[in-house]
C-alpha cells in the first residue's frame, strides 16, 4: 500500500475512533414530572446540559429508562433526541440545553425513573429536583423558560458505574425525636438481574463503626453493645430502579445491661452496599430534613468500609 494512502487511512480510523469515544452515557438517578410528595410538597425535575465544545453540535439521546418493576431500552430510531446546533452567523451560541421532567419521561408510565442519556460531545449534565409547590417554571422573558421555582436536591450526572462494594458516607438516622429521615436508591442499568446486600452502621463522634448484630441480646464478655438493624437484600430486575424510603425506621440500640430499645434520636450513619456480581450498578441516598421536607443528594462511592471481622 502506498504510504501516503496508508497514513490517510490510519488518520480516518483514528478520527472515527475518537468520534465514537466522544459519546458517553450520563445517568440521571431519579427523574420525576410533577408529582405530589410528603408534607404538601410537589416535585418536578429539570436537567441542564452545558456544552463544553462550542465548535461542534451536541446530540443528546435517551438510551434507557430504569423503573421499579423493570424498565426498557430505547430504540435509537425513535428515542427522544435533542440537538444543540453549532454557532450560526447571527451569533447565537446555544451553550445550554434545558430538559424538563416531562420531556425526559416521554412515554414512561411510572412517576419515577432513572434515565440514561447518551451524549455525543463533551458536556456537563446537572439534574435538579425541585419542590415547586405546583408553581410553573420561572421565565426570564416571554419566549424563554429559565428554571423551576423552589429548592430540592441537585446532582451532577455520572458516567461511572459501581462494581463490588460501595458505601454512602453521609446518612442520618430517623426516630421519634429525630427531624431527619434517609431514603436510599438503587439502579441497575443492565439487561440482567442484580442482587445487592445492604448494611447500616452508626458513626459515633470518635469515628468508631458499631456493627449490626443478629440477635437483640448479643453479649460479649466486655459487655459491648451494638446496633440492631435487619440487613437488607435488594433484588433489582433488568433495568430496575428502587428507592427505599426511611431506611432507618426500625433501627434499635442494644446493650448488655439494658437489652434493646428503639433509636429515637438522630445519629450520623453510613450505608454499606455489597455486590458479588460483575453487573455494574449505582446507588444514592437522599437525607431529608423532615420539618421542611428538604432533601440533599449523595452518590455512593466505591469501597468497603465494613468493620473488621
Image (cartoon, rainbow, N blue to C red):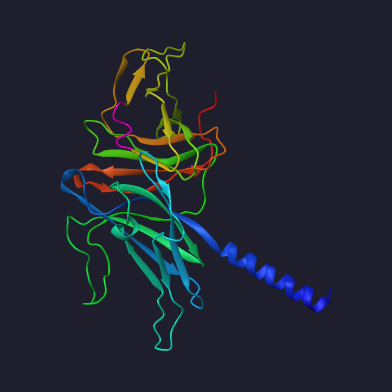
Does 171 appear above or below 151?
above
Does 148 appear above or below 258?
below
Residue at 46%, 79% in the rendered image: 86
Q: Quadrant of residue 225?
A: top left
Q: Position of residue 283 (x, y in %)?
A: 43, 42
Q: Is 305 placed left or right of 134 in the picture?
A: right
Q: Quadrant for the C terminus, please.
A: top right
Magenta segment: 244-250
Numbered circles on residues, count? 0
Q: Is 105 placed left or right of 24 in the picture?
A: left
Q: Position of residue 119 (x, y in %)?
A: 48, 63
Q: Position of residue 261 (x, y in %)?
A: 28, 20
Q: Quadrant of residue 303?
A: top right
Residue at 84%, 73% in the rendered image: 1
Q: Position of residue 103 (x, y in %)?
A: 32, 60
Q: Nearer the viewer, residue 187 or 274?
A: 187
Can residue 246 be found in the magenta stretch? yes
Residue at 42%, 35% in the rendered image: 271
Q: Nearer the viewer, residue 93 or 252?
A: 93
Can residue 122 be found in the magenta stretch? no
Q: Residue furthest toward the bottom? A: 89
- What main secondary structure does the magenta stretch of the protein show? loop
Q: Quadrant of residue 216?
A: top left
Amino acid at each position: 500500500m502506498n504510504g501516503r494512502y496508508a497514513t490517510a487511512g490510519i488518520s480516518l480510523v483514528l478520527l472515527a475512533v475518537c468520534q465514537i469515544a466522544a459519546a458517553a452515557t450520563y445517568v440521571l438517578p431519579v427523574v420525576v414530572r410533577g408529582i405530589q410528595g410528603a408534607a404538601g410538597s410537589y416535585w418536578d425535575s429539570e436537567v441542564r446540559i452545558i456544552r463544553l465544545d462550542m465548535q461542534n453540535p451536541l446530540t443528546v439521546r435517551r438510551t434507557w429508562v430504569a423503573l421499579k418493576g423493570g424498565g426498557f431500552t430505547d430504540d435509537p430510531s425513535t428515542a427522544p433526541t435533542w440537538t444543540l446546533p453549532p454557532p450560526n452567523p447571527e451569533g447565537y451560541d446555544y451553550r445550554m440545553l434545558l430538559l424538563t421532567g416531562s420531556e425526559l419521561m416521554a412515554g414512561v408510565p411510572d412517576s419515577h425513573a432513572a434515565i440514561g442519556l447518551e451524549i455525543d460531545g463533551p458536556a456537563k449534565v446537572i439534574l435538579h429536583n425541585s419542590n415547586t409547590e405546583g408553581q410553573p417554571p420561572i421565565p426570564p422573558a416571554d419566549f424563554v423558560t429559565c428554571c423551576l421555582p423552589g429548592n430540592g436536591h441537585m446532582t451532577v450526572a455520572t458516567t461511572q458505574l459501581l462494581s463490588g462494594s460501595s458505601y454512602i458516607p453521609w446518612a442520618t438516622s430517623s426516630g421519634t425525636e429525630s427531624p431527619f429521615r434517609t431514603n436510599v436508591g438503587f439502579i441497575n442499568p443492565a439487561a440482567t438481574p442484580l442482587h445487592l446486600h445492604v448494611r447500616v452502621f452508626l458513626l459515633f463522634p470518635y469515628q468508631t463503626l458499631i456493627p449490626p448484630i443478629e440477635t437483640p441480646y448479643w453479649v460479649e464478655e466486655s459487655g459491648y453493645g451494638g446496633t440492631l438493624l435487619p440487613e437488607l437484600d435488594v433484588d433489582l430486575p433488568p433495568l430496575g430502579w428502587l428507592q427505599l424510603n426511611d431506611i432507618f425506621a426500625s433501627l434499635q440500640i442494644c446493650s448488655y445491661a439494658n437489652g434493646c430499645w428503639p433509636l429515637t434520636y438522630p445519629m450520623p450513619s453510613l450505608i454499606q452496599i455489597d455486590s458479588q456480581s460483575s453487573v455494574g450498578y449505582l446507588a444514592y441516598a437522599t437525607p431529608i430534613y423532615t420539618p421542611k421536607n428538604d432533601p440533599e443528594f449523595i452518590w455512593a462511592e466505591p469501597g468497603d468500609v465494613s468493620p473488621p471481622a
